[in-house]
Image (cartoon, grey):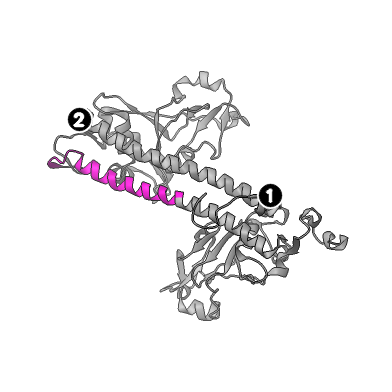
Amino acid sequence: MSAERSAAFKYLNPANLPKEWTADHFGNLVDFSLGRTPPRASPIYWKDGKYPWVSISDMTPNGLITDTAEKVSQQAHDSIFRGKLVPEGSLLMSFKLTIGRMSRLGIPAFHNEAIISFQPNSDEISPEYLSYYLSQINFKDYQDTAIKGQTLNKGKLNSLEIALPPLPEQKKIAHILSTVQRAIEAQERIIQTTTELKKALMHKLFTEGIHNEPQKQTEIGPVPESWEVVEMGDVINLFAGYAFKSDEGISESNTQLLRMGNLYQNTLDLTRSPIFYPDSFADTYKRFVLKEGDLVMSLTGTSGKEDYGFTVRIPKTDKRLLLNQRVTRIDVTDHRLQKDFAHHFLLSRKFLDHLYPTAKGMKQANLSTNAMKKLKVFLPCEAEQSEIATCFKSIDQKVVVAGRKVAALQDLFRTLRHELMTAKTRVHELEFPTGGNAV
């Protein structure tokens, strides 16, 4: 490759590529089209929508779009888009705010102005390879800072630098990556199916119990006749967190504040906007230090949304966690109630459908611990509580195992994508299945 050819690239050095590889700019490889958003103030473009209209939220990374959250009307089809539906099979890439998300259209559709669409010539470049390559570009090298965030303009899109192996190698690279991706999707389906199974089983067991006994009606629906129904405050103490001062936080330590956001979707995630305090705080505020096995619940969210009332059991962790305000620790105070059973009951629709109406606030929903104490809790016999809790723990473990597999496969996918796209690893160096879902 000539020095003049190499000089045309700013971020990609073709001289470092294998001799049979070439490189080019995105604008030379495809003709792309920008989308549009019909005026929101004009209902004629949205009412009785029949044509799929893609926004970034409809796109999953390297996924297939078969439906959209919004559809536009015949009027929008005719006057805004002039009937030019983007064909099925086209590639879509977001280039504003969320940059570089790639999806393929499984249906003809329109899309918004934050997305481009294009159809590579498959005789010259593998569409799958190009999709995977674009998804791993460091777009920070190309980004313009817009008023509302990060974006690329048409010129920047045209200048994206693409490394191009010979077409057969492109197809092999795409096959390897798609094989790993299918394995990820298979594990994600296991998680989804298992989660739905747990929801259905929760409804059944918290309504019928295990022993098929006659039922009785209670304030929160039918339950087995032998189950005792008591107020939450009779068997549980709700211990409120402390209003730690934000200006006393430090960059990092072994002592972290447990905030509402860390409990999102009933999962502990300490990486979400972490706030750290000096390790001495764990001694100064001993009452607010959480222990392994503690139950905690978030008390504040958005009115009209179920983004609060999340309950998590604290796992073993090297971090010392401080209980923040608007998070409550749930202490079981009566021997008749087992903590494992209580945990799963607090996650059930049986409980949540009575919890959410107690929240106060127009824009921000706030749960009151005093109001919560009056909610009803079930008390099966000790043996039945254990059986029910064990059943749910088994299901949870299956989700945990699948989640670990997803994480491992995602790491593998990212590593392979980088290694193969940069030619640090060549496809002939890998022993990989030529078909099926094996990984």
Magenta segment, principal secondary structure? helix
Residue 97 makes an appearance in the image = no
Residue drawn 52% across and 21% down? 282
Q: Outermost residue, right direction?
A: 3
Residue 196 makes an appearance in the image = yes
Q: Residues within 10 Å of mark 2 (few under 14, many from 20)?
A: some
> Could you say where residue 145 lies in the image, as x and y percent from the top left?
69, 55
> Could you say where residue 110 lies in the image, as x and y percent from the top left?
53, 71
The stretch drawn in magenta includes residue 16: no
Question: What amino acid does circle 2 point to?
Answer: Cys
Query: Which of label 1 and label 2 is nearer to you?
Result: 1
For label 1, the residue is: 425
Q: Separation of disc 1 and disc 2 at Cα?
A: 60 Å
Question: What amino acid does circle 1 point to?
Answer: Thr
Q: SS at mark 2?
A: loop
Q: Residues within 10 Å of mark 1 (few under 14, many from 20)?
A: some
**Which image quarter is the N terminus in?**
bottom right
Residue 252 falls in image quadrant: top right
> Could you say where residue 30 lies in the image, as x and y percent from the top left?
67, 70
> Could you say where residue 51 lies in the image, as x and y percent from the top left?
46, 73
Residue drawn 47% across and 24% down? 289
What stretch of residues is rendered in magenta? Answer: 187-216
For label 2, the residue is: 381
Residue drawn 58% across and 52% down? 432
Given residues 305 and 215, the one toward you in this image is 215
Residue 325 falls in image quadrant: top left
Left or right: residue 91 versus residue 205 is right
Residue 97 falls in image quadrant: bottom right
Q: SS at mark 1?
A: loop
Left or right: residue 366 versus residue 408 is left
